[in-house]
Amino acid sequence: MLYDLKAPILGFENITQVRFEKIDTLFSKISSPDGGFVMTLVNPYALREYSFSVPKYVELLLELDKDSNVEVYCVVVLQKNLEDSMVNFLAPLIFNPQNHTAAQIALSMMDYPDFGVKETLKSFVKQEVGA
């Protein structure tokens, strides 16, 4: 599904539209329509307690209201060993499936001190007893 980016992805300001594809319940990916840009995303709610305030300007850009069903994902920097892949919880991407718009929000470390930019996936894997 194609989404118009209403606020740019940090470092990729020239990308104005992305194709969003769910891989499974945990991972998704976005890519540019020409396929030259690909980024892996993770559902942060499947990993940890995750809550933040959407800035008013993003609500306006994405035409959000109290009844909007948005999807939130965080960027994953993949590593050879998947468990070493790093998640950036401070720059979530918000998708509004109703009007096919999306935006990235840059959260402040001061406001969200429990969110990191390089948290590894293995830090969220529950260890089995006796393993």
Image (cartoon, rainbow, N blue to C red):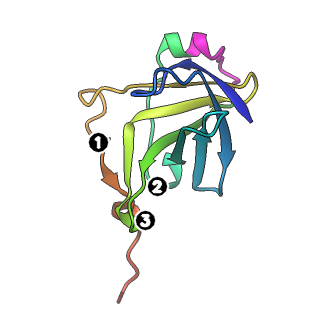
Residue tagged 2: 47
Q: Where on the picture, by quarter, is residue 122?
A: bottom left
- Callout 1, which amino acid? Asp
Find the distance from the CA under tag 3 to the CA under tag 1.
22 Å
Q: Where on the picture, by quarter, is residue 31?
A: top right
Q: Earlier in the sequence, mark 2 or mark 1?
A: 2
Q: Residue 78: x, y in percent?
A: 42, 55
Per the rendering, the mark at residue 18 is: none
Q: Residue 130: x, y in percent?
A: 35, 89
Decide: is 35 above or below 18: below
User: Quick one: SS at disc 2?
Assistant: loop
Decide: is 108 above or below 128: above
Q: Is residue 84 left or right of residue 60?
A: left
Magenta region, main secondary structure: loop
Residue tagged 3: 82
- Callout 3, which amino acid? Leu
Between disc 2 and disc 3, the foreground one is: 3
User: Quick one: SS at disc 3?
Assistant: helix
Q: Are marks 2 and 1 in contact (CB under 8 Å)?
A: no
Q: Earlier in the sequence, mark 3 or mark 1?
A: 3
Residue drawn at (60%, 49%) of the image: 28
Residue tagged 1: 114
- Callout 2, which amino acid? Leu
